[in-house]
Image (spheres, rainbow, N blue to C red):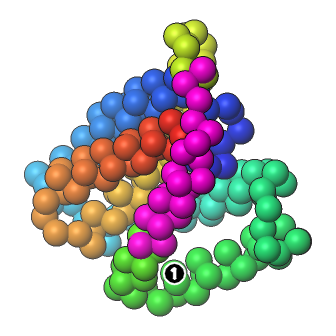
Amino acid sequence: MICTSSAYSAGQMTGIFISAIFQAVAVIPSVYLYSVKKFSIEKCPKWILTLYTLYFLLYGGFSFSRFYTAARSMNFPITNKVFALILIAGVCLYSAMLGIKPLSRGSAIVLALFAVSIAVLFIGSYSKISLDRFKVPDNTDILSSSFADFIFGGEIAVMFILFSFMDKNYKCLAYSFISVKLLIAEFISFIG
């Protein structure tokens, strides 16, 4: 969300909301497979697992590319942006090699840091929030924002994989995640 190249506007906020509705509909087959059909990712054929591996590699590369593009306009304590990307990739790979349990324990720390960064973002931008950009959006802005948010978010594929490691309440977890993601994205768009 912070790596977006479009301006924050009412059209973007509306597009994010529409995208969340599409994501909620798109997660229905995953929830159905796991809760009704008792699907397990471990029982998938090798070619499906290979497709998922390729998808996650491509999505990771795309995410790094978006981050690198956005990093040109950000100030980091590290002057070389490629070195910053290598550090982030190293931390991601190290975390992934440890397995899902240590990764989930570490996510609590990341969540706390994320909450602090959102609070700092709000405090820093509170005086600069302008309602002038929230005019009636045109349809192209809404459609492009909705499409971009739906395509750039890889959460549905990740949820499908992570359902294997979750409790049985897939529907509640999936829709809770989509709701919280929607609230955070709308908040960042509002103060952006």
Residue 12 image-quadrant placement:
top right
Q: Quadrant of residue 179?
A: top left
Task: Name the dominant secondary structure of the magenta segment.
Answer: helix
Q: Where is residue 160 in the image (x, y as percent from the top left)?
A: 34, 57
| Drawn side of residue 125 relative to residue 86, left or right | left
Quick check: 137 left or right of 103? Answer: right
Quick one: 83 or 122, which is closer to the camera?
Answer: 122
Q: Nearer the viewer, residue 183 or 90?
A: 183
Classify 10 Å Cα crowding around label 1: few (below 14), some (14-19), many (20 and above). Answer: few
Image point 25% across, 41% down: which residue?
Answer: 28
x%, y% of residue 161?
37, 63
Which residue: 88% across, 71% down? Answer: 79
**Above-or-below relation of 141 to 27:** above
Residue identifier under label 1: 96
- The amino acid on which the numbered mark 1 sits, given as a three-letter code, is Ala
* Residue 57 lies in the magenta stretch: no
Q: Is residue 72 above or below residue 44?
A: above
Assign the C terminus to one quadrant of the image: top right
Give the image quarter of residue 57.
bottom right
19 is higher (above) or lower (below) than 160: above
Q: Give the range drawn in magenta.
A: 112-132
Q: Of 38 and 180, which appears nearest the observer?
A: 180
